[in-house]
Amino acid sequence: MSDSNENSSSSSEFITDSEQEENPWGKINLRKHTKSKTKEILLFNNELRIGRSSQCEIQIKGLENHISKVHCIITKGESKNENDPIFPVYIEDNSTNGTFVNGLLLKKGKKQELHFYDEVTFCQIRSKKSIPPIIFTFEYTSILDKVKNEEISKRFEIMKKLGKGKFGAVFLVKDREDQKLYAIKSVNTDYYQSLFESSESCRQKSFDEVNSLLSFNHPNIVKLHEVFLLKDKYILLKLDFVGGGDLFESISTQTFSEQKSRNVMKKILEALKYMHEKGYAHRDIKPENILMVTKNGNDIKLTDFGLSRAFPQDGTMMTCVGTENYIAPEVVQGNGYTKSCDLWSAGVVLYNMLSGLSPFDGNRGDMPLLQQILQGKFYFYQEEFENISNAAKNLINMLIQVNPDKRLTAEQALNHPWILGNPEEITDQFQNIDEKNN
């Protein structure tokens, strides 16, 4: 091990073994609490013990009543092949007071895989003396300094982990070239392969589609600035950082007024119209993938294009993807679907914004969730929709149409009187409000 920054001050102290000549396979960034300075420790050995014992590779002194002799063990696993810089890393708790990964308590004696930039905490359950927690994050050094033949770790300063999903993790970074904040998303291409098809051309197809997304330039779509490829295994995406949280967080605290919902919905539709004209379907429209530029503002950006795809020449896609409460019935059926699936999801989002509820809910007693979706069976509940205009409900009905051929396109929805701000001027084209849903 080696230290690059010596920053101890207070009752606890970190001691590591001597520096080694070989290249490290990873590093941990160790600090005593959330506001303290970070101590960087490079990882060389295949096993790393952390605890109060002098036999540990990282010894924590001064917290004898809270840190066990060997508190936890980090183990480097074997990669699938010798040329692959990505390998499993495991953490095992061996303590009395517990080890936490991303806030969750590990089961003692059981190994758990440790992922890039996971946060590990000791002393999370504080005593009466308010012992500050010991915190560290884990990084692969091999991921960030071999991409695109340049040392990415020197170009980008990782500020914090923003989140993690099916496709990979997202980090807030500062680009040292322009001193601006961006989001970096890591994507495992194996997931693309398992999701889309098993052919050998799948990875190249995913790379081609990601490269096509570089051409997107719309105020309501998160901009993809650069793509970095590592050993045909990982794609790193440099994206706009949008700091206002997501739409889900916003509507979890309060419903939107019709005016605010209209402003947000218009921007969602404009982004979808742009994507669809470019030949792409998003395929996972939901509040979590709609970012707020500012916490209380109306400006939004669509994000998370992990499931987005260029639709074939006939416009029909086959793979069943998306999020259950927002997925269109034709996607559930598996007989093929078009970009129209995005408009169904947008209709569900509009319902969310106005009511704080989902039109399709697995806890509803009348029928199972997928059956609700397949039949397009939902209700405008009196309490939530009493003060919502018929024009708004009309737009929801015309988006949440089981038959995709009867569903509005993004362009048609943008010309709906409610979106245009003329809710009383419902023309013949928009007259057929589905009374059974009122």
Image: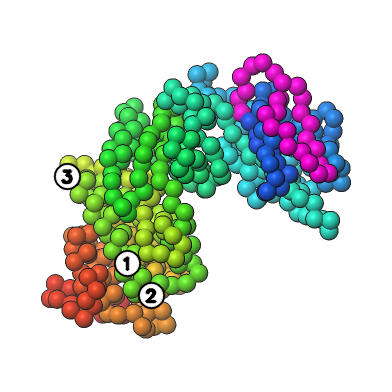
Q: Is residue 103 left or right of residue 295?
A: right
Name which residue type carries label 1. Asn
Q: Secondary structure at mark 1?
A: helix
Q: Amino acid at mark 2?
A: Ser
Count of numbered tags: 3
Comes first in the chain, label 2 or label 1: 2
At 32% from the left and 29% from the top, the residue drawn is 204
Callout 2 secondary element: loop
* Left or right of 318 in this view: 92: right
| The residue stretch that appears in magenta | 1-26
| Location of mark 3 (residue) | 314
Residue at screen point 48% across, 35% down: 176
Specify few, some or many for label 2: CA neighbours under 10 Å numbering under 14, 14-19, or 20 or more: some
Seen in the picture, residue 316 relative to 139 is either above or below; the reply is below
| Residue 261 image point, x, y percent | 35, 69
Residue sitting at 31 percent across and 52 percent down?
Answer: 219
Image position, residue 255 (x, y; %): 43, 72
**Residue 322 seen by the camera:** no
The picture places residue 60, in percent across and down from the top left corner, at 80, 37
The residue tagged 1 is 263
Residue labelled with disc 2: 257
